[in-house]
């Protein structure tokens, strides 16, 4: 009776096949590992098949994905969704045109026990499937992605935003506006939402995102300001300057000054120099921190140094030295 291979030996066998040249025999052997009961072995085989760049294994990958997602106990068949995620990634890499696994993966939730409770292990899978479906430009992509904008996991919501950005068009723009208006409060998610809108429809989105500079919620003001700054749109600077001049909340000083610097506009640079020159020492230091973004250009650095020297503030001088140490 032959000895059963350990998981380590199986993984070594798959890795050995990875080093072998392309051939029908090796492809068959790799596909054979997709039937293994160990999800880590399936995941490794799918990874290797994806790297091969050949469409031959697509039917085997589709069949394995269906088997795992239909398992009576999905967590037992594929703990942490490792195999399903690897297969979905491989299918996308190989140019699979069948949207079925992606549509199923988008809806898959797999709760698994962890210390202190349970966690959804399928978040990564939903993200991979969202991107794959967008790349296919499937006719139902927008409808399928809509629930992911309100997914319980923030990384999935971010991936859905990026998938909609890839799809483009007014449908994507409308969905992203709805997300912003729905009150999404996770900084990374709402920030990506604002950035996506400014990328998709800059002219139309500028006043929409700019309107959140007056929101009562700090997260929205901060993320709207940073998205406007990073957009490098010419008309973003006046909005940010007006917001800065009307702001009375000390906690927003740093992100607003940073947003002004992110515009990379000469007018913003000059304005920040004025803030550093005329504001209280704490605000002047924050302005110096923001101006460090311009410091890669020696001309800007010299102008910053000149204002710092004229202020005669040791703390400000120390801040400048931190950002721009003396050259040896």
Image (cartoon, rainbow, N blue to C red):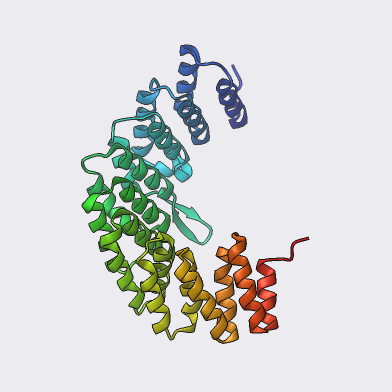
Residue 233 lies, with reference to residue 163, above or below; the image says below
Pinpoint residue 148: horizontal percent, then vertical percent: 32, 53
Residue 195 lies, with reference to residue 38, above or below; the image says below
Q: Residue at x 50, y 16 (%)?
A: 22
Residue 68 occupies which quadrant of the picture?
top left
Figure quadrant of the N terminus: top right
Pinpoint residue 106: horizontal percent, then vertical percent: 32, 46
Q: Residue at x 29, y 31 (%)?
A: 98
Using the rendered image of the protein, determine whether residue 316 is visible from the camera's viewpoint: no
Using the rendered image of the protein, determine whether residue 297 is visible from the camera's viewpoint: yes
Figure quadrant of the C terminus: bottom right
Residue 19 occupies which quadrant of the picture?
top right
Pinpoint residue 78: horizontal percent, then vertical percent: 45, 39
Front residue of 171/236: it is: 236
Residue 78 lies, with reference to residue 24, above or below; the image says below
Q: Left or right: where does residue 202 sit relative to residue 222?
A: left
Front residue of 256/97: it is: 256
Q: Left or right: where does residue 174 sit relative to residue 50?
A: left
Q: Residue at x 33, y 37 (%)?
A: 70
Pinpoint residue 207: horizontal percent, then vertical percent: 28, 68
Q: Left or right: where does residue 30 sit relative to residue 132?
A: right
Q: Residue at x 43, y 32 (%)?
A: 90
């Amino acid at each position: 009776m032959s000895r059963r291979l350990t998981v380590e030996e199986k993984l070594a066998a798959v890795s050995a096949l990875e080093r072998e040249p392309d051939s029908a025999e090796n492809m068959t052997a790799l596909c054979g590992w997709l039937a293994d009961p160990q999800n880590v072995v399936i995941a490794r085989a799918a990874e290797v098949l994806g790297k091969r760049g050949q469409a031959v294994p697509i039917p085997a990958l589709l069949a394995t994905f269906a088997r795992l997602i239909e398992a009576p106990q999905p967590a037992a068949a594929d703990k942490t969704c490792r195999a399903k995620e690897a297969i979905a990634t491989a299918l996308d890499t190989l140019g699979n045109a069948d949207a079925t696994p992606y549509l199923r993966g988008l809806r898959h939730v797999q709760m698994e026990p962890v210390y202190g409770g349970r966690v959804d292990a399928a978040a990564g899978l939903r993200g991979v499937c969202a991107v794959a479906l967008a790349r296919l430009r499937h006719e139902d992509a927008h409808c399928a992605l809509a629930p992911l904008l309100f997914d319980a996991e923030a990384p999935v919501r971010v991936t859905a935003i990026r998938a909609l950005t890839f799809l483009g068009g007014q449908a994507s723009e409308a969905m992203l506006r709805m997300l912003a208006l729905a009150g999404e409060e996770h900084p990374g998610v709402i920030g990506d939402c604002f950035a996506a809108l400014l990328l998709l429809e800059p002219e139309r989105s500028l006043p929409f995102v700019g309107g959140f500079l007056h929101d009562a919620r700090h997260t929205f003001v901060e993320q709207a300001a940073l998205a406007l700054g990073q957009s490098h749109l010419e008309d973003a600077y006046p909005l940010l300057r007006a917001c800065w001049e009307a702001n009375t909340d000390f906690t927003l000083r740093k992100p607003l000054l940073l947003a002004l610097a992110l515009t990379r506009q000469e007018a913003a640079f000059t304005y920040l120099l004025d803030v550093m020159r005329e504001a209280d020492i704490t605000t002047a230091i924050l302005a110096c921190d923001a101006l460090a973004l311009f410091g890669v250009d020696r001309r800007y650095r010299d102008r910053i140094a000149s204002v710092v020297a004229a202020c005669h503030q040791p703390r400000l001088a120390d801040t400048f030295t931190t950002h721009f140490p003396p050259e040896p």
